[in-house]
Each structure stands twice: as C-alpha cells, then as structure tokens.
Image: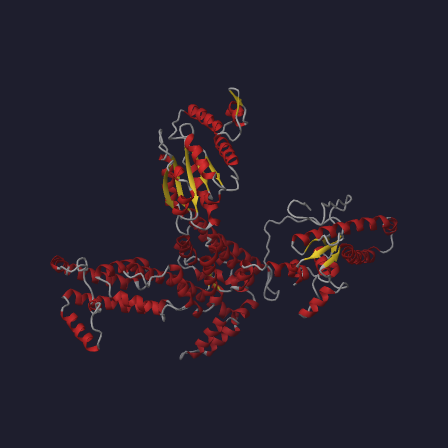
C-alpha cells in the first residue's frame, strides 16, 4: 500500500500466480464454496433480470420479469420527464444569457463584460447548470467556450494555461497546427521565449484567427465560465480580471461567474479597483423550490403516473430537501429509490399495469409511450397466480372494502363470499379498484389547482402556503377539518368582484374535464352579468367617492361591509346595529353579488370536502402508493460504522452465499456462536472478515506475528477441507500420485499466498480505521477505539 497519505503498516505487495492459477479464490457455482483455480467463464446475457422471486419463493419467473420490466418502463418515463424539466427550467435565463454573450463585446469596450449568474446555494446542481450554460453558449458559434472550476485553477498560472489551451483546442484545425505550434509550446518569437501561461500566446492566436476568418472581435470572442467563483483561492479572480482587462484590445473576452451566495457578498470580496473594470449584468437562476414544484406537478401529480408517494415518505423526502440538502438531484434519487423498493419488494406491484389505470390516453406524450403501456396492459393478468390473490385478500384496504360491502343494506352474501374464495371474481374487480385510484389522483390535481387559484386571488399573505406544503396536507388528510381552509373560505367571502371574477376564471381553467367545471362556468357567467348591469353605477360611485381605497373597489359583499373597522365597538348590540346599517346601505348590485359569493362559498366547501378525502380510504391503495420510510432512512442516512461491522462479522448478509451463513432455523445468538466458531463458518469467510474476528479478541496492542499465526491456522483448515473434498471426487489415480510429489511445492506456494492475503487484509483494516502503527513495540499495531464497540 502506498505511503503518501498516511503511515502504512504494510508495503506494496503483488501476488503473481503460476500459469493456470490466475485467481486465488473464486466461488464454485455447484458447491457454493470458494476454490482455487481459474474462475468459470461468464455467459453473455442480452438482458439481466436481477429481481428475486417473492411470495416465499413461489412467485413464477414470468411475474418476476414482469415486475422488473414494469419498473424499468415506469421509471424510464419518469426519468425522461425529469430530465426534460431540469433542462428547460432555466430556458428563459439561458436565452437572456445567450443574448448577453452575443452582444456584450464591442469594438472599443469600456470594461470586461461579466455575467453574474446567481446559481443559489445548492452546490450539487451547479455542475448541471454550467454544463447547460456552456452547451447553450457553444451553440451560438461566437467562439470558444472554456469552463473553469476551482480544481482547474489552483493558482493564476494554471488558470491562464487552462484558458489558453481550452481556447486554442476548441477551434484548432489540423492545417493550423504547424503554424501555431511554436506559440502553443511556448516557443521563441523575435528572440523572446514565452511561457505556456503567457496571454501573449492567446493574443497572437486571436489575431491570426480573426485575420483568417475575416471576422470582427464583436462576432468572435472567448467566453470563460467560472463555475464556483467563491471557492477560487486568494486573489486569483481579481488578478485574472485585471489581466483580461489589460488584454481587451487583443483578446475579446466575456466572463460568466457563478455566485452561490449573494451579489452583495460577492461585491465585497472584490477590490473596488477591480469592480470599476467590469461591465456586469445579473442573471437569476430559477429557485430550487420552483424547480421542485414543477417536478411534483409534472411527475407525481401527472395522470400518467403509475406509482405515487404516500404521506410519510413524501414528508420525509421534502423535509430532507428543505432542511438539509436543497438538492433536486437528491430528491430525484429518493424518488427513484421509492420506485425500486416498491417494484422489488412488493409482489402486487404487477397490478399497476391493470388496463383501466389509464382511461385518458391523451395524457401520454407520444404514441410510442401509449403503445408500450398497452403492451404491458395486455399481459399483466397472465402473470397472476394463486398466491397473488391470497396476498390481495390480506391487504387492510381490501378487508375494509369487504366490511363495507357487508354493512350495505342491499348486500349480497354470495358476492362477498365469491370475492374471498373465487380468484376470477376478484380479478374482475382489480381494474375498477385501479381506476378508482387514478380518478382520485386526477381529482386531487384539480383540487390543488383550485386551492392555488384561491390563494393567488386573496390579498392577505398570512394564510398562503406553497403547493408542496398543500400537497403534503392533502396526502395527510388535514385540509378539510383544519383551520387553514376555514380561514381561506372566510377570506373568500370578503373578495371584491374583480378578485372573485379572476378566481372563477382560474377555477374554470383548472378544472377542465371535471363535473364541477360546468358549475364554475355558470357562476362566472352570473357574476359577469351582474357586473355588466352595475357597470354604470360603479363608475359613478367611484367618481363621487372621496375615501382612499374606495375607487377600483368594484362590488363588495355584505361580509366586507360588516367587517369591524379599527376602533369600532365590539358589543353584541353594536354588531347588530352595524349589520343592519350595512345592509341598508348596500346597492342592488351588491345584494346580488353577495348571493353569488354565498353560492361560490357553498360550492367550494362541498367540492373540497368531497375531493380532499385521504388516499388511504381507497381500495388497494397499498399497490399504487408507496409509503415506507425505513429503507430511505437506511439508504440516505447511512450508518457507516454499523454497516461495516455487520459486513465483517456477518458477511453472508451481503454475499448471499450459503457457505458463510449459519444453519437454518437458528436464533440470533446461534448466529453469533456460529460466526465465532472456527470449525463453523469462519473458514469460508473473506480474509478481512477473518482478521476482524481475530482482531475483536485482542487487546489494545496486537502482536502482528500472533495475528498472522492465527490467520494461517484458519487458512490451513480451509486448504485441508478443499483437499478432502477433492480427494473424495478423484479417488486414487496417477494424477493424485503425481500431485503428492509436488505437495511440498504447493504448501510453500500456499504459505506465500496466505501471507499476501494477510498483508492485504491488514492494510484494509488500517484503511478502515481499525488499527494504526505504534512506536511502543515495532512488531505490534495499536487497536483504535473505532473498532472496539
């Protein structure tokens, strides 16, 4: 092992086996053990199916392959949508940035054109963003584009060298190689030797290039994009900008700087002398929350979505994004992991392909997608078997459905019994259950559109919530009985006619295709008629009104007039007097408008109560909603120490081999005894696992020779077991007699191999932090506290 990073216990060790013995140990496919010799050849497979049979191993191969195919197809569609969203979310900013690059440089510039890209604090997304920026800038054909990171620019010389090489390599032709070779290699020109980081090389190349192309400096320029500006070392950025300003007449350049903090903080880091040399323009990148909202709307809420997130899992992913990562990539990884877990571990996930889950074929992007899903629909029922129907009958939602059927007054006991006993009867209802889940999801999307329209039409911002939070509340079922919705409906009663008209128009647009759409259209038409009838009266009232805020008020309802002004008395009698006086002062149009407001309020309350029911009330919601958080907590909140120690103490959990596993029907205590028994599974475990188990029996100082001796005894038992297995298969033969003559050579060879494997395992133990060298005894190593738990 190399000794550049830390003081290593071991030195570099290479084990070269004789011809025909390239591999020391490999797994024998027949006996599930490790043997010496050449590993078996791998077969070439066109498509590898990695999913395992479920239902206690009774799931047929067709169902297993169908589950994996269904996962690959469904997540492939979601992945394409997400990639399209991420590539187009900043499309407007890229267009503005392209116009800036195209027109930023003039023949006589007053300063260095600099585009300040406010990329936000999410560092993980900056790489994707600047790849989009460089691709869009290269598409303009305005000259070479160089992308710089802090890794490429540890100092000014390396930064200049990167710029020179990147600019010349981007547009260098084969015919120009000989002409500019002296400049590129730092050759001599007029007796002066130029370094490879001297900007005179780039200036000469630009002069040659502009002359050959007969182009102006405004049309052909160098664009330098700095991805992580704040992480550049020291005064590198001011020095670079000063140099570029000095070479502006010879080197036309545009600089794009990525800023993760704020514009004010970035300006404070630059000297005022450097700031005066810049012609800067700001470009805002779309916020991460807006991007995540688009993904939730276009992916999770899309009617074509097959698997949705439950309340607990969505809250876990959203809280992780909001409070920790702020990374869109992390949220997408969590979404993909949810798809993987659902299809990998749930045998009933094949029901996602039920034919009536997509009645509206217009939701597909292309005809190819529609045909692909149609092919999956045609074969989903063929893979079902008896165990699938038994698993369906154990679902809590199905049991609740059967209980409701029994409680109905017109219940037919024979039909309920058929659901519990006849698989064909149950199979005929699966499509209806699937359609019910899809209908609920489509209705939820329209309801969220109505709530968004209501919030955008309100003047008060105290009760407004983002779509991501409202979606979580809808999944949890906390909206209908919550205080938030009551406050929203109360504020809706106090809307003026202009705000209510705007709200109804958005509701009509957001509920297209639903049953409630016609009712919203009727209320909007009724409101328009009232406004047209009162248009003249409203204009006269606005002209004669002297109170501020009375103009442009439009029609108001009696609920607005009844609202107590600041300083009014709040006694019961005063309220009655105020209400009576408010009704007496109302115009005829306001009375009619109040009736419209009451109709809208009643419609909204009824519609929201009906459409915001929890998804857990749907039958077979366990198939179409994934709501398990434990795998995500283990995968995305990794516990490194526990995982490493589990892998070293019980490697069969990761290797999935029978040779290291304890016998079946054993307790956890029996597993520990088996792992510690040298005659049990220890001889078949990997070398590092053996060393770790011996290491756990040592004190604070470990004698390396004793450690190696114990390891060698276990390895010797391993060799003896392999020889006994081989002798049983061979019997007495000439090959066996010939092998006995070379027994001493083989034993020496094995000792050398055991020593090499011991050194490798000890180096791995040191790399993982279990041991370290010690000066107390030269032939000992020190045991660290990390591995003593």
Q: Nearer the viewer, residue 715 or 368?
A: 715
Mark yes or no: residue 777 visible: yes
Quadrant in the picture for residue 135: top left
Q: Nearer the viewer, residue 127 or 399?
A: 127
Q: What is the x, y in percent for residue 296?
A: 42, 57
Q: Nearer the viewer, residue 270 or 292?
A: 270
Q: Is residue 479 left or right of residue 497?
A: right
Q: Is residue 700 above or below residue 147?
A: below
Q: How many marks?
A: 0
Q: Is residue 11 above or below residue 674?
A: above
Q: What is the x, y in percent for residue 357?
A: 44, 61
What residue appears at the point 46 percent right and 74 percent down from the top-left corner?
A: 400
Coloring scheme of the render? secondary structure
Q: Nearer the viewer, residue 217 or 612?
A: 217
Quadrant in the picture for residue 208: top left
Q: Is residue 495 above or below residue 180?
A: below
Q: Pick out the residue farthest to the top.
A: 190
Quarter of the rendering occupied by the C terminus: bottom right
Quadrant in the picture for residue 769: bottom right
What residue appears at the point 40 percent right and 45 percent down from the top-left corner?
A: 268
Q: What is the x, y in percent for residue 336?
A: 50, 56
Mark yes or no: residue 306 visible: no
């Amino acid at each position: 092992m190399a000794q550049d990073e830390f003081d290593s216990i071991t030195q570099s060790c290479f084990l070269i086996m004789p011809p025909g013995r390239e591999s020391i140990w490999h797994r024998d496919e027949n006996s599930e053990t490790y043997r010496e010799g050449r590993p078996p050849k791998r077969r070439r497979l066109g498509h590898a199916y990695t999913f395992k049979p479920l239902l206690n191993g009774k799931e047929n191969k067709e169902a297993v392959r169908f589950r994996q195919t269904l996962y690959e197809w469904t997540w492939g569609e979601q992945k394409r949508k997400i990639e399209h969203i991420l590539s187009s979310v900043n499309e407007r900013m890229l267009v503005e940035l392209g116009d800036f690059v195209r027109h930023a440089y003039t023949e006589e510039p007053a300063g260095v054109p600099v585009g300040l890209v406010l990329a936000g604090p999410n560092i993980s997304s900056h790489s994707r963003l600047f790849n989009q920026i460089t691709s869009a800038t290269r598409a303009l054909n305005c000259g070479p584009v160089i992308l710089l990171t802090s890794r490429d620019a540890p100092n000014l010389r390396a930064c200049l060298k990167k710029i020179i090489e990147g600019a010349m390599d981007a547009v260098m032709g084969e015919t120009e190689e000989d002409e500019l070779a002296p400049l590129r290699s730092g050759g001599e020109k007029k007796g002066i030797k130029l370094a490879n980081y001297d900007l005179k090389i780039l200036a000469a190349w630009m002069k040659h290039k502009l002359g050959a192309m007969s182009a102006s400096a405004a049309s052909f320029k160098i664009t330098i994009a700095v991805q992580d500006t704040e992480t550049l070392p020291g005064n590198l950025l001011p020095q670079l900008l000063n140099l570029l300003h000095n070479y502006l007449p010879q080197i036309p350049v545009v600089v794009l700087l990525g800023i993760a903090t704020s514009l004010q903080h970035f300006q404070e880091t630059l000297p005022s002398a450097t700031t005066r040399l810049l012609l800067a323009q700001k470009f805002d990148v779309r916020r991460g929350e807006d991007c995540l909202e688009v993904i939730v709307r276009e992916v999770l809420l899309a009617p074509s979505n097959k698997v949705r997130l439950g309340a607990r899992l969505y809250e876990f992913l959203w809280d992780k994004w909001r409070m920790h990562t702020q990374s869109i990539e992390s949220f997408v990884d969590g979404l993909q992991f949810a798809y993987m877990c659902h299809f990998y571990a749930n045998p009933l996930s094949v029901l996602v392909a039920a034919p009536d889950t997509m009645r509206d074929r217009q939701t597909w992007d292309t005809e190819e997608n529609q045909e692909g899903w149609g092919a999956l629909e045609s074969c989903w029922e063929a893979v079902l078997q008896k165990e699938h129907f038994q698993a369906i009958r154990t679902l809590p939602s199905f049991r609740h459905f059967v209980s409701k059927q029994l409680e109905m007054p017109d219940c037919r006991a024979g039909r309920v019994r058929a659901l519990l006993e006849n698989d064909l009867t149950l199979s005929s209802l699966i499509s209806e259950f699937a359609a019910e889940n899809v209908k609920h999801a489509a209705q939820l999307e329209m309801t969220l559109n109505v709530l968004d329209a209501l919030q955008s039409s309100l003047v008060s911002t105290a009760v407004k919530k983002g779509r991501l939070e409202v979606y979580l509340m809808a999944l949890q079922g906390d909206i209908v009985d919550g205080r938030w919705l009551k406050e929203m409906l109360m504020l809706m009663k106090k809307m003026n006619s202009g705000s209510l008209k705007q709200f109804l128009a958005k509701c009509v647009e957001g509920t297209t295709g639903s049953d409630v759409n016609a009712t919203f259209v009727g209320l909007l038409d009724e409101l328009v008629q009232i406004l047209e009838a009162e248009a003249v009266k409203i204009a006269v009232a606005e002209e004669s009104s002297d109170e501020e805020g009375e103009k442009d008020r439009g029609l108001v309802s009696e609920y607005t007039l009844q609202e107590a002004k600041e300083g009014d008395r709040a006694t019961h009698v005063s309220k009655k007097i105020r209400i009576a006086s408010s009704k007496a002062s109302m115009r005829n149009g306001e009375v009619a408008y109040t009736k419209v407001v009451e109709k809208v309020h009643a419609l909204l309350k009824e519609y929201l109560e009906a459409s915001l029911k929890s998804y857990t009330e749907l039958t077979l919601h366990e198939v179409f909603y994934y709501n398990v958080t434990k795998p995500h907590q283990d995968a995305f909140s990794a516990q490194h120490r526990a995982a490493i120690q589990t892998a070293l103490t019980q490697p069969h959990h990761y290797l999935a081999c029978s040779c290291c596993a304890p016998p079946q029907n054993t307790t956890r205590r029996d597993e520990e005894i088996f792992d510690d028994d040298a005659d049990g599974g220890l001889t078949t475990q990997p070398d590092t696992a053996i060393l770790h188990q011996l290491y756990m029996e040592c004190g604070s100082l470990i004698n390396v020779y004793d450690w190696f001796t114990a390891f060698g005894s276990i390895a010797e038992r391993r060799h003896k077991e392999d020889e006994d297995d081989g002798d049983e298969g061979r019997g007495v033969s000439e090959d066996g007699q010939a092998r006995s003559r070379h027994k001493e050579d083989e034993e020496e060879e094995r000792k050398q191999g055991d020593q090499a494997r011991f050194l490798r395992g000890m180096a791995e133990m040191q790399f993982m932090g279990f041991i370290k060298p010690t000066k107390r005894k030269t032939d000992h190593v020190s045991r660290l506290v990390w591995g003593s738990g």
